[in-house]
Amino acid sequence: MTNVEQQQTADDIIIIKDLNKWYGDFHVLKDINLNVKKSERIVICGPSGSGKSTMIRCINRLEEFQRGSLIVDGVEMVEDVKNIEAIRREVGMVFQHFNLFPHLTILENLTLGQIWVQKKPKAEAEAVAMKYLERVKIPDQAKKYPGQLSGGQQQRVAIARSLCMAPKVMLFDEPTSALDPEMIKEVLDVMVELADEEGMTMLCVTHEMGFAKKVADRVIFMDAGEIVEENTPHEFFDNPQVDRTQKFLEQILDH
Amino acid sequence: MSNTFKSDPIEFKPTAALPAPKSTVGPIAWVRENLFPSISNTLITLFIVFILISLIPGVIDWMFISANWSGTNQEACVSDGACWVFVKAWSQQFFYGSYPTDQLWRVNLSLILLFAVIILSFTLPASFRLRVSIPLFLVLPFVCIAILDGRLVGLDFVNTDLWGGFSLNVLMAAAAIIVAFPFSFLWALGRRSNMPLARSISVIFIEFFRGVPVLALFFMGSVMLPLFFAEGTQVDKLVRVWIVLIFFMSGYMAEVFRGGFQAIPSGQYEAADSVGLSYWQKTLLIILPQVIKVSMPNILATFVMLFKNTVFLLIIGIPEVLQLLLTALSNSNWLGGHAVEGYVFVGVIFWVCCFSMSLLSNKIERDLDTDKRD
Ligand SMILES: Nc1ncnc2c1ncn2[C@@H]1O[C@H](COP(=O)(O)OP(=O)(O)O)[C@@H](O)[C@H]1O
Ligand SMILES: [Mg+2]
């Protein structure tokens, strides 16, 4: 089923083994196995409802799973609050609907975690925040509230908010699918830069195939709770191995 | 209208805009649309107008034109209008109870502090509004008690038996809702909690205090609460009433907060989790401020209800404003039947307070509407 060798090496920052999850009777994730190397960029695609969000949300424990194991940067995901907190410190997440804190200014959105979780002094946290606001090209919006920004700007703020926490892994759950077409590019540009310059480990659920071709080391295709196919972007798009992948690609490329 | 602006300003002759068609705007159209849209509505309108015309002149005459305004005793009320002299003569009692006359500034100061904190909490810059106004609110009841009681701050001691009047209604309601605030937030959290014990305790508490009439609660407070205090300790009557009001209020407000919690999208919790905030950081820094904001109109509505319910304190002999009115009405110097004046007066002061609060809550609702931020 896989063309890329799955060997556990010392570089693996995420190790997912035989992960299974049920919602009641509904088997949403079936024997997921996935190793992610440091600085690796992975794009996850698949039809709606195939369990993509659920899988990446397991990585920072926004969802619990019932069977299997998950190790992030050497810390095993177990019930223990300490482990969960340790893993969340390593993992940043960007959501489809941005989920900025509406009652806080942009700057406060970015400093909150640094001040309360990392216990940084306020001035230092603000300096870090401004650095990342510049990276995402909206330092002039620092004093505004999220509701005053466009969708694309809000999503860039959300990316900056995660980066401020200096995560080792970034999870993106369809970061551009709630955006108007003209704003998609500004967000993707930021993500491409992040991949190129920071060498960030990235797992990105997206159907932006241009983005996948440009930055992904591996593309993973999920369907009905399983990883059906995984391959380099080149092979994945030009030479899909599995029927279901072919059908899916036909559907999204038709448009 | 096709007035194009020509280069020479002298030639510019704007034609007057046509007035809007009479039938769609203006007072006449409004009246027609709202008062006489159909035969049955027309009849109802005419009937109401008839009632108003036959009542209003009499009421105005009684309240203002033939009313007695000056004088100090019952004999001054000679004409057959309202005897406002009665209200005037008792006004200090109605507002302050038996609080010593030379110490009344302490009651006024407490009221001023209360209004100052309320105004601050709506006018401070949003960035630190909650951080400043919540602590201010929380210390306020205790500061007011210290001022009114006097012993802690080096003033003359005024026994709580002497506190009373409308100021007591206001301060009692405010002190109860403020202390109830954090409790109700905890009850609401408990009701949402995953822990079965916390959840069932919260549900039982909330439903008990929402389900039992406030009068019954007051009786229980004055009769049963003393059983829970250690033998021999005398707990002040006002303190007992305060505790009952706090419980009563926190049951209602817990439900208000529960509604507020439901209005917060799950993405807010997830974002807070993914940033790494702990449960309490998430609850207090992210969720609470948003819950307060969306619940504000309902909090005010609940407060209005509590405020009006403070008149029931008369049942257990607390000298609140209505109790003092009854005392005044049975005073041997004022046996001329001034009940109507008294009740109108009490009704009006409550109405003024409650109406201003509902104006305030309308304003808040409008603000919430205009700065919708997702
Ligand atoms: N809280 C939930 N309870 C029950 N079923 C859920 C819940 N969340 C998601 N699901 C179901 O799990 C499946 C996978 O969802 P999801 O991971 O969001 O899919 P994707 O992100 O690939 O579109 C869907 O069929 C969805 O209906
Ligand atoms: Mg999804």
Image (spheres, coloured by chain):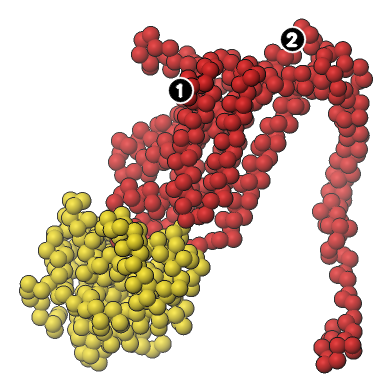
Chain colours: A yellow, B red
Asked which quadrant contains residue A77, the reply is bottom left
Decide which of tag 1 and tag 2 comes sooner along the chain.
1
Toward the viewer: B359 or A52? B359
Residue bearing the label numbered 1: B152
Which residue position is annotated with label 2? B331
Residue placed at 54% from the left, 61% from the top?
Answer: B372
Residue reaching furthest to the top: B332
Question: Please, which residue is most extreme toward the front here?
Answer: B154
Nearer to the camera, A30 or B134: B134
Mark 2 belongs to chain: B
Q: For this view, does B335 lie left or right of residue A169?
A: right
Pick whichever, B255 or B281, lies toward us. B281
Dot label at residue B296: none
Q: Position of residue B47 (x, y in %)?
A: 88, 40
Please tell me which residue is depicted at 46% across the width and 46% down the height of the picture.
B132
Q: Is residue A197 above or below residue B169?
A: below
Q: Is residue B125 visible?
A: yes
Classify residue B316 as left or right of residue A94: right
Measuring from the top left, give residue A70's x and y in whole percent. Answer: 16, 63
Residue at x 55% of width, y 27% of height: B172
